[in-house]
Image (cartoon, rainbow, N blue to C red):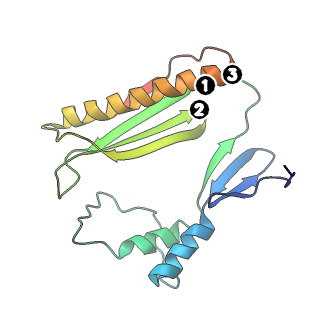
């Protein structure tokens, strides 16, 4: 085993460590994607994602590389805390029948530990929801399972039972 000094790059993720925060980014990976798609010199969009974009298997949007270029330098920030007891906060949302090809909804879950995002997922639901309420319920159940597992893991790592997480649902 050897000491390679401060972590700066791991599994395609760039790591920058400052006095106040730890930052993760993927500018090198995003730049490679732009080179591969022939869009390295394109004019970038300001926002990293188009609102309510619906892609199908048959039609992929060429605006996606332009949005990647606009977000190349964005990072996820993990602020350093002063040892205070941290709280899990879990957010869930869904798009009703967002998959145009199969009419299935997509669940989105984002988990924060204190102010830092620690887990996220986006996946197609296994069932075709018949209402927005049902789609939101399925997403919330997925988020609750994620929250309970992370609460257990946090307790195992710290030796202290974690407080119940806050679950925020968009419905």
Q: Position of residue 6 (x, y in %)?
A: 82, 52
Residue 37 at least partly seen: yes
When the figure is inspected, residue 91 is found, relative to residue 158, above or below; the finding is below
Circle 3 crowding by C-alpha within 10 Å: few under 14, some 14–19, many from 20: few
Picture coordinates of residue 84 (x, y %)? Answer: 71, 23
- Return the residue at label 1: 154
Residue 61 figure quarter: bottom left
Q: Disc 1 or 2, which lies upstream in sequence? A: 2
Residue 171 appears in the rendering:
no
Say the numbered circle drawn on residue 108: none
How far apart marks 1 and 2 lie (CA) works out to: 10 Å
Image position of 60 (left or right of 166):
left
Residues at circles 1 and 2 in contact by the CB criterion of under 8 Å: yes
- The residue depicted at 50 percent of the width and 77 percent of the height is 34
Q: First in sequence, mark 2 or 3: give its number.
A: 2
Residue 67 higher or lower than 101, as above or below: below
Q: Are marks 1 and 3 in contact (CB under 8 Å)?
A: yes
Depth check: 45 or 54 in front? 54
100 or 84, nearer to the observer: 100
Q: Residue at x 51, y 74 (%)?
A: 33
| Residue at position x 43%, y 44% in the image | 121
- Rounded to the nearest angstrom, the CA distance separating label 1 from label 3 is 6 Å
The image's mark for residue 113 is 2
What secondary structure is found at the residue carrying circle 2? strand
| Residue picked out by circle 3 | 158
């Amino acid at each position: 085993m050897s000491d390679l000094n401060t972590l700066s790059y791991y599994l395609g993720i760039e790591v920058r460590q400052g006095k106040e925060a730890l930052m993760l980014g993927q500018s090198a990976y995003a730049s490679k994607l732009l080179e591969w798609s022939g869009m390295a010199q394109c004019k970038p969009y300001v926002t990293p994602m188009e609102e309510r974009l619906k892609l199908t298997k048959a039609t992929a949007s060429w605006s996606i590389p332009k949005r990647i270029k606009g977000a190349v330098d964005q990072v996820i920030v993990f602020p350093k805390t002063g040892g205070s007891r941290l709280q899990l906060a879990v957010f869930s949302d869904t798009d009703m029948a967002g998959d145009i090809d199969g009419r299935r909804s997509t669940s989105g879950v984002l988990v924060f530990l204190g102010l830092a995002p620690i887990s996220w997922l986006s996946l197609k639901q296994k069932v075709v929801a018949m209402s927005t309420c049902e789609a939101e319920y399925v997403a919330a159940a997925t988020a609750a399972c994620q929250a309970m597992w992370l609460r257990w893991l946090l307790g195992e790592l710290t030796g202290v039972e974690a407080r119940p997480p806050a679950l925020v649902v968009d419905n």
